[in-house]
Image: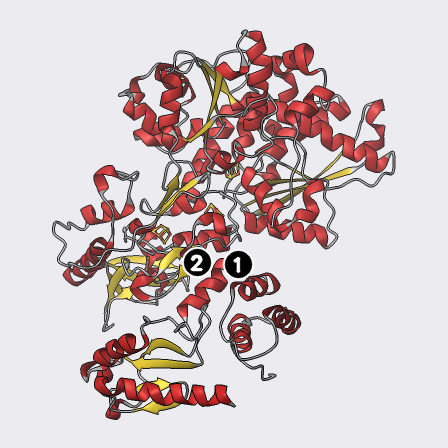
Amino acid sequence: MISVYINNIKVEVEEGTTILSAAQKAGIKIPTLCFVEGKTPQGACRVCVVQVEGAKTLVASCCTPAADNMKIFTNTKRVREARRNVVELLLSEHDGDCKTCDRNNDCELQELARELGINTISYQGEKTQKTIDNSTPALTRDSGKCIKCRRCVTVCNEVQSVGSLFPQGRGFDTTIGPAFSRDLDSVVCVQCGQCAAICPVGAITEKNDIDEVWAAIDNPEKFVVVQTAPAIRAALGECFGYEPGTLVTGKMVTALRQLGFDAVFDTNFTADLTIMEEGTELLMRLKKALVDKQKVALPQFTSCCPAWIKFAEHFYSDMLDNISSCKSPQQMFGSVAKTYYAKKIGKKVEDMVVVSIMPCTAKKFENQRWEMNDSGLRDVDYVLTTRELGRMIMQAGMDFKSLPDGKMDSPLGMSSGAADIFANTGGVMEAAIRTAYEIVTGKELPLDGLHVEPIMGLDGVKKASLKITGTLKEWSFLEGVELKVAVVHTLSNARKIIEAVKNGEVFHFIEVMSCPGGCISGGGQPRFTDNSIRLKRIQAIYKEDEGKKIRKSHENPEIKQIYKEFLGEPLSHKSHKLLHTKYTART
Amino acid sequence: MSEVQCCGCNEISEEEMLKQLDNILDDYQNTTGALIPVLQIAQNMFGYLPEAALKKISVKLNKPFSEVAGVVGFYSFFSTEPRGKYLVRVCLGTACYVRGGKEVLNALKKELKIDVGQTTEDRVFSLDIGRCFGACGLAPVIMVNDDVHQRVKPVKIAELMDIYRNKENDNKKE
Ligand code: SF4
Ligand code: SF4
Ligand code: SF4
Ligand code: FES
C-alpha cells in the first residue's frame, strides 16, 4: 500500500494503481474520453490531465501510476485551462450539430463542454471530413462527429476480437473505421454494437427505425404487435432518470399500449419456448452420443445471440453443427406471432406487423437474414433498441414516471423467471438446467434459490459441472453422468472457450453472449454502461426472476398451451419448421 | 531476402507473386511483430501493396484486415497504388519548408501533372512528400529514388525531370 495526496486528501492505494483509479477511490472525478474500463490506457485524449507536485508538465492520470507520497492536484487553474484547451480543440474539428444529433443530452463531449464551462471556441479551423456510413442493417457511422478517442477500436479489437475498426491514415486525416476508411460492410463486423455503446459522441449509433414503426402504428390497416426482450425492463428506466437497475416492467407495458401497439407481448414467452426446444435438443444430442453411439456435435452452443452466430459463421465455420439449431427468442416470436397468433385472432399475415424492442443492435441484422421468413413473410418487421423506445415514448409526450403499471397480453405474454434471466450472462444456461434437470430426474433442481452459483457474475469464462443422479427410467443413460457446462460473454472469451474445446477440454453445453455481462449491456441499451451498472441491471433481473411464482420454462401455462394447440411437442415437425434454423459459413 | 524486380518492368504475373508471397508468409505465421517486415517484403515484390496481397497477409498472419490497412496507411513508406519507376520525394521539413519546399512541390505537381501520392500514367514518376532527409543545410532538398538533389529551384524542375525521362527513354531503346 502507498499513500498519495489528491487535493490534499490522503488516499491509500495498492502500488501500481493509476492516479485516475486513486482519484476514483477518493470520490474525486477526473474527466476521461479515451479510457476504457479494464483495458490498457491509450493516453490519447489528454482530457484526464492532472498536476503533480514536482513534475514539469501535466500528466495524463489514466496512464500514470501513483507513487508513494505523490501530491496530486486535479483542480488547479492550469489543469482547468489545459482540459478546456483539449476540449475546445476537439470541438473546433467536430462536425456535429447538437440540436439535431442522436446524442443530444446524452453526449459525453457536450457534457464535458458544459462541465468545463466552455462558452466560446477560440480555435477556428478545418472540420473533420464527414462521411455517413449506412451500409449495414444495424449501425450508422458519421465520421464528422468522431473525436478519434479510439474507444471503439479497443472494444472491437480487444473485447470482441473482431477487428472491424482501426485508425486509418495519419494526423488530421486519420479516420477511425474499416480498412481504407471504407464502409462497414466491406469488412467483417458482427453488428454487436458495442462500438456504438461505448462511443462518447454520435459517431456510431444504431440505425434509426423509429419512423417506420410510427408509420406502421399510424396505418389503420395494420395490426401491430410488439415484443420486448427480457433486458429492456431493467434498463429502460435509465432513459427517464431512474437509477440503473430499476425494474419498470409495468410502466413499459403501459407506455407501449399508449404508443398505439395493438398487442403487447413478451419475448420472454419465446425465451421459455427456446428452453423447451434447446433443452430437448441437448438431451437428444446426449442420447445419440451415449446410447446410439452416433457421432454428434458436442458441446452444444447456445444460439440466442445473433452477433455470436455471425461471429461463428465468419471465424468458426467448422463449428456450426455445434450451435443449437434454435432460432433466437426474437425470431421464434416473429414466426409464432405470424402463424399461431395470427390464426387465433383471424388476421392475415400480410396485415400483421411485428416490432421488437431489443437491447441489441445485432437483432436489427438478424431480422433481415434471408432465412427468417418462415411465416411466409418477414417474421419480424422492425427492431428498435431500448434507446429508440425511450425516444418514441418521449416523442409521444408521455410522463413515463407517472404511468400506471400494465400487464402483458395473452397468449404470448406470460413467462417464467427462467425467461427473465436470459438477459444476463449465465441466465440461458441456468434456465436450461432448471428445466433439463427436472425432465431427466422428475425432481426440482436441488440448488439454493434454483441458482447455479458458479456461472453467475461477471467473470469472462465460467464453468460448472453437475452430477446427474436419480434419473427417470427413460433417461437412465444419464445416470451418474457429470454434466459439464461453460458460460462466456464477449467474443474474445468465446474464442478462448472454443480453443479450449478444440484442445480437448470436454463440455456438453456452452452459453455464449457477445456483450459484456450479456444483453443487459447490449449495444442498444442506455449509455453509459460500466461494470457497476451491469451488476445493478443483473441484480434487477434476478429480482424479477425470484419474484415470480413460476420460475421454470416448462411450467409456463401458455407454453403448455402452445404445444397442446399448435406445436405438438418440442422438436416436432412444426417446431422444426417455425422455431429452428440453419447457419451458413461466411468469409 | 530474394531480389524480385519491381513494378511493370518484370515478367512474372501478379498471380505468381501472390504464390511466392504465400510461401514467405508460411515462415512468418507464428512470429510476433511480423506485420511490418512482411509488408516491406511484399512492397518490394510488387512495387506496391495490392489489395489481394494485403488480404493474404491479413488471413495468414491472423490480423484483421482493418488493422493491416491501418498500418499501411500510417507509414508513408507503404503505397497501395502502383508506384512509378522514380519516386520523387519533396522534403517539407522545417528548413526546406521555409526555404521554398512548398514552391518546389507545386512546380513538381505542375510538371508531372499529378498530386502527392499519385503516379504518372506512364508509371515513370510518383510524387510524395517527406519530413527531413537530414540535409537541412542544403535546403530545399528533393530525393529521386536514392539521388539527393540540393538547393532545388522551382524553375529548374523541368530540366531535372528530363534527366530521368531521358534515362527511361534510353532504357527502352536498348
Ligand atoms: S458492431 Fe461490434 S463487430 Fe461491428 S464494428 Fe462495432 S464493435 Fe466491431
Ligand atoms: S467512433 Fe466514437 S468511439 Fe470511435 S473513435 Fe470516434 S468518437 Fe471514439
Ligand atoms: S449479447 Fe444480447 S445484446 Fe449483445 S449482441 Fe448478443 S443478443 Fe444482442
Ligand atoms: S482518458 Fe487519459 S488520456 Fe484519454
- Give the quadrant of residue A5: bottom left
Amino acid on which disc 2 is placed: Phe
Q: Which residue is mark 2?
A: A166
Q: On the same chain: label 2 and label 1?
A: no
Quick check: can you spot residue A319? yes
x then y, percent, for residue A8 = 22, 59
Residue B38 spot, x, y in % from top left: 55, 73
Give A449 or A362, whichever is nearer the viewer. Answer: A362
In the foreground, A154 or A364 = A364
- Kindly check if marks 2 and 1 are in contact, taking CB atoms under 8 A apart as contact: yes
Q: Tag 1: residue type?
A: Pro
Q: Which mark is residue B64?
A: 1
Badge 1: residue crowd in 10 Å (few <14, some 14–19, many ≥20): many
Q: Is mark 1 within 8 Å of ligand 1?
A: no
Residue under the image location 36 percent in, 18 percent down: A255
**Residue reaching furthest front?**
B173
